[in-house]
Image (spheres, helix red, strand yellow):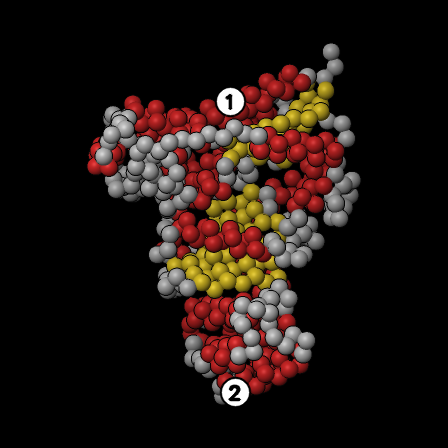
Amino acid sequence: MSTTSYLFVCSIGPVQSFIASARKTLDLWSGSYILSDLIHIALEEAEKAGATLIQPMSIPERTQVASLPNRFLVRIDGKADDVVLFGQRIERSIRTYWSEQVLASVALAFNSNMHFAQKQALQQAEDALEVYWAFERLTDYPATRVRLEQMLASTKLSKPFTSHVQTNITCSVCHERDALSESPTQSNDSYADLKKNTHGLWKQLKGNDGNIVLRENEHLCAICLLKRLYARLHRSIGMESFESTRGFTDGQDGYFTILMADGDDMGKWISGKDVTLSGYQPGTLEYHQELSRRLTRFAEEEVPEITNRFDDSEGRVQLIYAGGDDVLAFLALSKVFPFLQATHDQFGSEKGLHTTATMSAGIAIIHSSMPLQHAIRVAREMEGQAKQLEGKDGVGIQIVSNSGQGRRFVVPFQQLERLERIRESLMRDVSTTFMYHFFEAFRRFGPVDGEKPFLHTPDLVRSEIKRLVLRASIGTASSDRLEQLIDDLHQLYLLPDVPTLLEYFHMLEAQRFLARRLNKEAVQ
């Protein structure tokens, strides 16, 4: 009997909440790595079953950086019933590996009395992991792929709602699930009883081999425990410990950065709508495979090379995730803009996706005393705002000072060079009171959260900026540098992507903030 070709897609989750629930840098790394490993297991199972990989195009070697997204697409030949069995086999392999790892982390953590904790862990593991898959008979590839994506989306929307009553002290990291405990709780247990029951298990922690990753005052759920111990379960990866955020703050007054970058218009690139790869028919299977090949090469070869180039004694760069068009990294403040520039340029080159491809990014600059979860949330939010720029290719930056004060702005990527010139000039060419007088002069013309005034008379704006710059200039400032500063401030003022005075002020305040830390030798 003849066989039929089908497209099969599988997705696991939840992604954002799973990765963002992080108290330590090791938690963040593990969250991405575990999801990547689950897809790795599924892809190996798919290849054993004779499936043809489409996205990704190949199964990467395990390195210290997670490199697989939370989904994959393959072609499988057979009858419909065979594909159903294939999907069940894939899901079973994912869930089996997941449960095994959760139980292994419990066994690694505690000395004894784990029976209830193991039962609790298995239940939490089953409830936490979401696996979705769908398949569609392959006829016309572009149309089939669209239908398949619609089916997968419908599957996710129709998932059954489940609620779980919390009966114990919640996890110290995610605060979503009960912490593992020694025995079942009772309905009439007091808080003291709950605390005693939980601590009864956690006081039996095994030794940490001199590297503390678990503490008795931490009470974790099974999922967060797995994230904390995953590197120790897989020592061959070579990531048993992970530098704290303070390791990225040398010489930067305690500040570090989290960078999230993502390719623009990937839906259009996949469909071949408005953008395309030369030499390939848009939307075809061969086109999609070539797209996957380029993204895989960028993530597995180019991004790690860029990371190694910038990670040195003058500032750390630690890649957390690089998969397809996504990049997540910790960086010293001095390295974030050079690293982003190099990654952005490589993505939009022949060694990346395409010379016309662009990438948007979110940057959180935050003090190491702030909770890591907050930093992750800020970076993701700024990436989302950068994606809202018309034409994208944007960068969203938020600085959260140690006092909690925030400065945020979004600009097109091409404006980063202009901002760098302003940073240098603010430190070298004008007095330290320039910013204060600049703000006072402009805020008189309207509310700071309203539209910038005098946009219809740009010459008037330039004249006022020139007056303020020349008034604040110092003796060593050259006329050319002052004229460049005036032009840069004026061009940014007219920028429609910075619509309010408040955002404009935040953008300039941020340059002063950065300049004081990146160019300390130049501070007047």
Residue at the (47%, 54%) spot, across then down: 378
Residue 281, above or below 432: above
Image quadrant where residue 134 sits: top right
User: For numbered disc 2, what is the local secondary structure?
Assistant: helix
Residue at the (43%, 61%) spot, across then down: 400
Taking the image as shown, residue 144 lies to the left or right of residue 317, namely right
Q: Are marks 2 and 1 in contact (CB under 8 Å)?
A: no
Nearer to me, 303 or 10: 10
| Marker disc for residue 16 | none
User: For numbered disc 1, what is the local secondary structure?
Assistant: helix
Nearer to me, 38 or 177: 177
Residue at the (62%, 80%) spot, across then down: 462
The reply to whether residue 289 is in sight is: yes
* Disc 2/disc 1 C-alpha distance (Å): 71 Å
Q: Position of residue 252 (x, y in %)?
A: 40, 64
Q: Position of residue 69 (x, y in %)?
A: 55, 38
Residue 17, above or below 107: below
| Marker disc for residue 471 | 2
Residue 434, above or below 77: below
Residue at the (57%, 69%) spot, across then down: 450
- Residue placed furthest toward the top: 1
Quarter occupied by the C terminus: bottom left
Q: Position of residue 320 (x, y in %)?
A: 47, 46
At label 1, counting other C-alpha atoms closer than 10 Å, the crowd grade (few under 14, some 14-19, many 20 or more) is: some
Nearer to me, 327 or 65: 327
At label 2, counting other C-alpha atoms closer than 10 Å, the crowd grade (few under 14, some 14-19, many 20 or more) is: few
Disc 2 marks a residue whose amino acid type is Arg
Mark 1 = which residue?
92
Image quadrant where residue 281 sits: top right
Question: Mark 2 or mark 1, which has the lower sequence index?
Answer: 1
Disc 1 marks a residue whose amino acid type is Arg
The reply to whether residue 330 is in sight is: no
